[in-house]
Amino acid sequence: MTETIPDTFIKSAVGSLKRGRKVRRRLPDGGLLHIDRPLPFLVLFRHPAGKPDYATADFVKAEASYIIAKEEQTTELATLIKEITSAMSAKFGAFMILELFAAPSAAPDVPLFQVLGPEEALPATVNVLRQELEQIKIENVPVTVAISSNEPLLTGPLHLLSEDELKQMSCLMLGLELKPVYLNTATGNAYPLLLRTLRTHLSNAIKKAVFDFVRVQTTHHPTHFQALGRRAVVPAVWRIDKKLAAISDQFQFLMLVTPVNASEAWEQFCKSKFSKAPTFHYRLMPVDTDLLKRKLYNIPLEKVEDPTLGFLFRDKRHELDKMLTMLSDRNTPDFLYSSLQLFGGVDEQLLKVAEGILAALPEPEAKGDIPLIPVEEFAALAEQEIAFLKNQDATMQSGVEIRKDIVGLLVSKGKLYIGTDAQIPRDRAEALIQHEVGTHVLTYFNGKAQPLQQLYVGVPGYEELQEGLAVLSEYLVGGLNHDRLRLLAARVVAVHHLTKGCHFTDNFWRLKEEYKFDDDTAFDITMRVHRGGGLTKDAVYLRGLVHLLQHLKDGGELEPLLIGKIRQDYIPIVQELIYRRVLRPIPIKPRYLLDPAIQPKLDQLKTGITVFNLI
């Protein structure tokens, strides 16, 4: 027997809304009322009598204001919805209800979407919804949209509000019938990937239709359709975010795939007269990768109702899976295959850019002619830059450490590590400070300032944009010289030949003889590319710079990219979460964005220049 919805429940829920509070309460018999702030709309789903439809119910969970109930509760549900509508219509001047339900069959002649609206005067909102639904593209699923009368919603046996009641409360009542292509007709089980994809598309279409209604008919004026999305994040999201970050924090990937015997390996390579690849040694593995994978896949991502956050978490799980696979395959041929999946390879266009740079720029100067800055002095400069950033955010806890087991410079978990043997040209010191501190350290702590921990541990594929930003910062402070660009181009060429089966010694000799790099620079590039069994990450520096320049040419801004460790195609996701106030404005800005003297350079970048224009 179905439980009824008590009057006390209705009064309490509506009272909370009138006081401007969010409402998230379980309805009797397993339903749910979720309104995360007073809003002028409501999305509704009712389980058919005696036949729960959990797959279709999932569609409404993407919205900021929804009810999931049962058809058997129609009488009490009508009272609840009437009270909510009355209160919110009084607050905003109008209200909109959209009820979702599944079509009784998935026959070929049934449209994928059927919109039910008023017959006498088709509202503009219906046209917006139809247009947005028609634009949905899903592989192997024909998208068809039909429009019919909403009369069954007003007079049928399951009607909630009469036409007169709707008019009195300035309420628009729409229906949306879905063809259940996301269900296996034989078993009744959902196709999870299709359900997830359709849910994301449908959620955007609903928000855009609601946005059209709200901005014309109500006193509520959101800045963007995404601002109508969920702000209240259920506790399961924070638990899952924390668990993913905890797994990511248990290992330092770059340190674990960086040799600890670089100096000894160089001496060994020299003794063989560059004819035999050296043996590299790595840090002991601090984790059991199999056990960590078990923990990773025990995280219940299916509990995340929000499609955007669900996508972000699944994406991160996939990346952590690949990283753990790479660590377990370290120093084996399989390491390279996972690296290609995680960091990508070198496409033809990027290779042309890299080879063009190497052909256009002169050979580097001999290292003996370049003044170097002592490691201790460079560390002091880095500490000064960290202090500059701390002035903007006193909670920032960073530092600099000089270590023997580090090659060159490395930022890990917001801290800068400097190798004791690092050779840093004095004229490149400021550029490297902005690269390491002004980008890598800064974005780590900007991400730390966000409620979502994924923004500091790094979303999947964040390295490309990170390194693009870091290299561009070198250019903005006047430190991106010919030698640096040749180095980035050489890394791309070395990665390309690695993926074609080139051995360590062959890659070294190509850099030395064809591209005229000195012995230890050629060795350093080759070691970085071949470490662990073949790491393609070094191609992301130049690729990231190329893509970032295109982003600026297309009218994009730099500042939003510094919110944390994100990748470029995450920009719409980040912007959506900012609109929804799930994310906050960035607390720390790099020195170059605060320096008026650098503004002309930024303006020039927006006119559309290529990597070759930088030199």
Image (tube, helix red, strand yellow):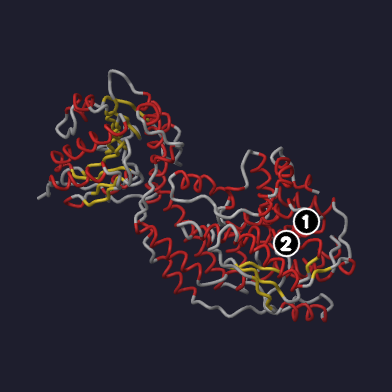
Do callouts 2 and 1 mark residues in contact (Cβ within 8 Å)?
yes
In the image, taking residue 606 as reference, residue 450 lies left or right, namely left
Compare marks 2 and 1 and give the one earlier in the sequence.
2
- Please state if 345 lies on the left or on the right of 115 as rendered: right
* Residue plotted at (34% across, 23% down): 123
**Label 1 crowd (10 A; few <14 / some 14-19 / many >=20):** some
Say what amino acid the circle numbered 2 marks. Leu
Above or below, 137 against 243 in this view is: above
Q: Nearer the viewer, residue 27 or 498?
A: 27
Q: Is residue 90 above or below residue 453?
A: above
Residue lying farthest to the top in this orientation: 120
Mark number for residue 432? 2
Helix, strand or loop at label 1? It is loop
Foreground residue among 384 and 51: 384
Q: CA distance from mark 2 to mark 1?
A: 8 Å
Q: Is residue 367 above or below residue 344?
A: below
Amino acid at circle 1: Gly
Density class for disc 2 (Cα within 10 Å; few <14, some 14-19, many ≥20) is: many
Image coordinates of residue 239 in percent, x first then y, are: 38, 62
Residue wearing tag 1: 479
| Residue 586 picture location, percent across and down | 54, 52
Q: Residue drawn at (59%, 66%), measured in percent from left and top?
A: 414
